[in-house]
Image: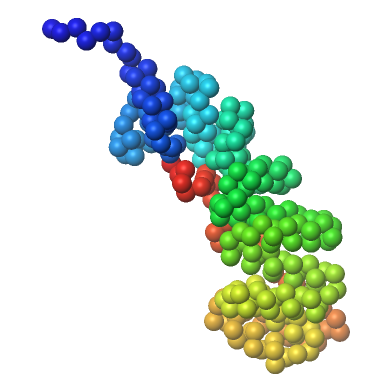
């Protein structure tokens, strides 16, 4: 039998192959993990690496930021946020400009309520990829979360600053709508009904099917005695969100009988499509 020379272990061969591929082209996390574990990408798609195997890969390759990042994602998906945070930080200690890790760590910090730290981290991700719609949307989302916390604390000036910063982040349509709606609610708390009406109307102009803004506009019109405008918003709301319309129908009768009623406006703490609502979300170009 022909002597083919010293035989490398499957782990060594896989690791060498992964290094060669990293030089040739950027690889998604799943492929990296699969190569480190000695499996093919095709088999990895059928059977994702287990936590045990990802831990083994990170131990076998302690200087590989991608191995720690893949392990962090799995920890987060399992609800182990402390371990996930540690792995994301390890990845960043090895590669400070690792934008995927910055994005995921910032998102996780936002979910845990550490908004100040989350904003610092996400700003770094945006600086690295200024054209990333996902990163900008996440930044705006965390600003919205921070603003809501400040509103509950009664820190209206700071809340307004956070909302305006979120709008300036130029995130997606959904988060911008939420921020503008919450700005209108803030104006209510500041007893600036005209500014609130103008803000809610701008939201509706951008998206005629925005239920919270329609609801809030109707409330304001009812309290101001403009029942024609209020009814217009009420009937528009019925075609968008019947549950909110039902609540509005109950409330409008109290407005007509009470001497003064503070509108219980609808803020938007979360919203459809928020990255903070999806555990394990990463930039699509780096999806596992």
Quarter of the view holding residue 90: top right
Residue 190 percent location from the top left of the image: 85, 69
Mark yes or no: residue 126 visible: yes
Instruction: Give me the residue at 15% from left, 8% from top.
Output: 2
Which of the image's four quarters has the C terminus?
top left
Mark yes or no: residue 244 visible: no
Instruction: Give me the residue at 82% from left, 57% from top.
Output: 158
Residue 46 percent location from the top left of the image: 32, 39
Q: Please determine whether, in this image, residue 115 is positioned above or below residue 159.
A: above
**Left or right: 20 in relation to 154:** left
| Depth check, front residue: 4 or 121 | 4
Which of the image's four quarters has the N terminus?
top left
Q: Please determine whether, in this image, residue 237 is positioned above or below residue 76.
A: below
Instruction: Give me the residue at 31% from left, 31% from top.
Output: 40
| Depth check, front residue: 160 or 49 | 160
Quarter of the view holding residue 5: top left
What residue occupies the far bottom of the structure in this picture?
Answer: 228
Instruction: Give me the residue at 65% from left, 74% from top.
Output: 203
Residue 181 percent location from the top left of the image: 69, 69
């Amino acid at each position: 039998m022909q002597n083919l020379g010293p035989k490398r272990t499957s782990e060594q061969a896989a690791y060498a192959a992964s290094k060669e591929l990293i030089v040739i082209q950027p690889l998604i996390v799943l492929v990296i993990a699969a190569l480190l574990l000695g499996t093919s990408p095709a088999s990895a798609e059928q059977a994702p690496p287990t936590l045990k195997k990802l831990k083994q890969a990170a131990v076998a390759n302690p200087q590989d930021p991608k191995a720690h990042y893949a392990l962090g994602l799995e920890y987060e998906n399992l609800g182990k946020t402390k371990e996930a945070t540690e792995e994301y930080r390890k990845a960043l200690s090895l590669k400070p400009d690792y934008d995927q890790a910055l994005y995921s760590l910032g998102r996780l910090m936002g979910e845990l309520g550490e908004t100040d730290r989350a904003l610092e981290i996400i700003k770094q991700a945006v600086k690295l990829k200024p054209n990333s719609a996902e990163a900008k949307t996440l930044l705006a989302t965390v600003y919205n979360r921070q603003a809501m916390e400040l509103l509950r604390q009664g820190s209206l000036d700071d809340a307004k600053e956070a909302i305006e910063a979120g709008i300036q982040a130029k995130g997606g349509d959904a988060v911008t709508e939420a921020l503008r709606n919450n700005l209108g609610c803030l104006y209510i708390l500041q007893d600036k009904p005209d500014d609130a009406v103008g803000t809610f109307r701008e939201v509706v102009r951008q998206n005629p099917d925005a239920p919270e803004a329609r609801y809030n506009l109707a409330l304001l019109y009812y309290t101001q005695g403009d029942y024609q405008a209020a009814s217009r918003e009420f009937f528009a709301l019925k075609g968008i969100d019947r549950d909110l319309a039902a609540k509005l129908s109950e409330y409008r009768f109290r407005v007509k009988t009470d001497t003064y009623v503070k509108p219980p406006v609808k803020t938007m703490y979360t919203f459809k499509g928020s990255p903070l609502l999806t555990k394990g979300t990463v930039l699509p170009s780096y999806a596992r």
